[in-house]
């Protein structure tokens, strides 16, 4: 049954929230975990749908997956019997294409369905395939499947034409057991690239320079067991930072790496919020209406595209005219129509949103168009006057663990209820008054 959120807005968020493990790091790390025949233990796993879907795909090719707890899993790749990831898996979770690099690197062959476009635009994977070819693999696309194999994988010097997180991770996976040295130039520098590299190194790989635009990989013969804890989720943390500022609250966001949040912190300070950094926490508060700004999404360490809908929502409530330029994905403004229904004043021209700040939003029924935009609409609901219902929350659940529980613990009034359940709506309204 489909669920929706019902939110009564207007309460500033106060208190402390614990951030879960990084979903996007976990996706790369789980794929990497199948590359050894020894058992690997991965901790601080976020308990979100994307992770569970990838674990199903990993089990589907025969690996042994033992979920020790909601946040820890044991994986043994010695029992893998299939090299094929079908369209059903890739449709549910694009990042199952990391199994292409992992299987190719380990077994020298793999067959993975070609992912289609998605809610945020066309998403080519030419750079991933260029990398595999450079390592000596043949890559053919037939009947919707990418077939790749190699007698031998040999290290090479690879220049990425665009900075791609996915291609950087996939090439690291495919090359870490190749013969000789691989250099990835113009590599992505996101924190989760570093986390995947650190995990591979903990299994015996030799990867240097992750976090810079030049990654050097010396192939090793085999990888071995490891116990590894995933870094905190930069985007989940950023979303709570925005929620704290938008509701004019005061929230201590714990279990984060403040360095990873700098692009967000700097913008929040620039528009008038207060951000305090601690060793593994940030505290965000705001007491008055914030100011306008100009934002452009860029690869790390620039402002993350995955925070674009959330910051635009905040700017839609801030004083003056702001612009938000989306330079990574072509179709990431789908939430704008929903925000407009709540009273926002935003015009999209090409890849730029021109935002005239309004004093406040009013609640209505809206629908989450994708994961991050969905989270932004929840933030909009939290600040709106009256009741907001957010449909299609399955997108939000792909990447936010216990979103409603974490927000309610900070003083929000929201609940997950079945779609079209009028009695549940009435019950919620009676409860929150
Ligand atoms: C990852 C994140 C996603 C985030 C994005 C950008 C995961 C699982 N997902 O997605 O949440 O929004 O990084 O930070 O980590 N491109 C090509 N050819 C390619 C690959 C990419 O042209 O072969 C283009 C894309 O269309 C896009 C840009 O490069 O315009 C960046 O994409 P990329 O960094 O690859 O994003 P993902 O890894 O898919």
Image (cartoon, rainbow, N blue to C red):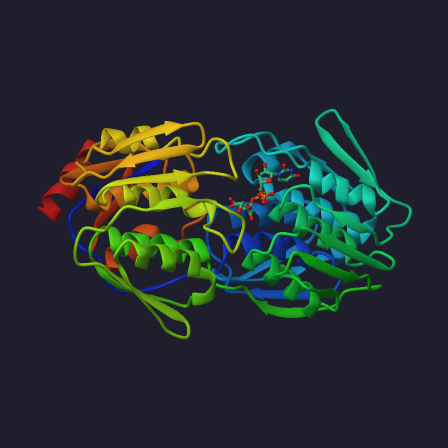
Q: Residue furthest right?
A: 151
In the rendered view, would you say 293 is above or below 121? below
- Give the x, y percent position of residue 98: 66, 47
Q: Position of residue 365 (x, y in %)?
A: 24, 31
Q: Residue 395: x and y, percent? A: 42, 39
306 or 14, nearer to the observer: 306
- Is 100 left or right of 359, judged from the image as shown? right
> In which quadrant of the rendered view does residue 419 lie?
top left
| Image quadrant in which you'd find residue 83 | top right
Instruction: Write down the quadrant of residue 79 in the picture.
Output: bottom right
Seen from this angle, which residue lies furthest top? 143
Do we see residue 20 in this rendering? Answer: no
Give residue 188's position: percent from left, percent from top.
Answer: 61, 52
> What residue is rendered at 37% in x and 34% in y?
353
User: In the rendered image, is residue 205 in sight?
Assistant: yes
Identify the residue at image location x=24%, y=34%: 344
Q: Is residue 369 above or below residue 40?
A: above
């Amino acid at each position: 049954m489909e669920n929706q959120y019902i939110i009564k807005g207007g309460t500033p968020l106060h208190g402390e929230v614990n951030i879960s493990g990084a979903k996007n790091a976990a996706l790369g790390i789980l794929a990497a975990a199948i590359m050894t025949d020894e058992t690997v233990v991965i901790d601080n796993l976020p308990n979100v749908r994307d992770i569970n879907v990838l674990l199903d795909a990993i089990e589907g090719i025969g690996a042994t997956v033992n979920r020790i707890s909601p946040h820890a899993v044991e994986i043994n790749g010695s029992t893998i019997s299939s090299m094929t990831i079908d369209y059903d898996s890739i449709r549910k979770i694009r990042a199952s294409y990391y199994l292409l690099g992992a299987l190719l690197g380990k077994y020298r062959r793999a067959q993975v369905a070609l992912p289609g476009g998605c809610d945020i635009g066309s998403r080519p994977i030419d750079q991933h395939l260029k990398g595999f070819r450079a390592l000596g693999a043949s890559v053919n696309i037939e009947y919707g499947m990418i077939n790749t194999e190699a007698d031998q994988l040999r290290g090479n010097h690879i220049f990425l034409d665009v900075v791609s997180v996915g291609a950087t991770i996939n090439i690291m996976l495919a090359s870490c057991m190749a013969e000789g040295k691989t250099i990835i130039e113009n590599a992505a520098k996101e924190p989760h690239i570093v986390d995947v590299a650190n995990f591979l190194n903990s299994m015996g790989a030799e990867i240097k320079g992750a976090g810079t635009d030049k990654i050097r990989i010396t192939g090793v013969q085999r990888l071995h067991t490891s116990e590894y804890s995933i870094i905190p989720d930069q985007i989940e943390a950023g979303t709570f930072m925005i929620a704290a500022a938008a509701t004019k609250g005061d929230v201590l966001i714990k279990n984060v790496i403040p360095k990873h949040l700098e692009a967000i912190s700097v913008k929040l300070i620039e528009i008038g919020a207060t951000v305090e950094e601690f060793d593994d926490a940030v505290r965000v508060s705001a007491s008055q209406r914030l100011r306008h700004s100009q934002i452009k999404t860029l690869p790390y360490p620039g402002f993350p595209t995955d925070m674009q809908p959330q910051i635009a929502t905040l700017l839609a409530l801030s004083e003056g005219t702001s612009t938000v330029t989306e330079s990574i994905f072509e179709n990431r403004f789908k939430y704008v129509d929903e925000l407009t229904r709540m009273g926002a004043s935003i015009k999209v021209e090409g890849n730029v949103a021109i935002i005239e700040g309004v004093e406040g939003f009013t609640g209505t029924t809206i629908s989450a168009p994708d994961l991050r935009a969905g989270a932004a609409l929840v933030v909009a609901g939290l600040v709106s006057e009256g009741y907001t219902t957010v449909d299609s929350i399955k997108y939000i659940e792909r990447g936010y663990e216990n979103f409603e529980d974490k927000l309610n613990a900070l003083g929000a009034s929201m609940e997950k209820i079945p779609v079209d359940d009028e009695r549940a709506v009435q019950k919620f309204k009676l409860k929150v008054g």
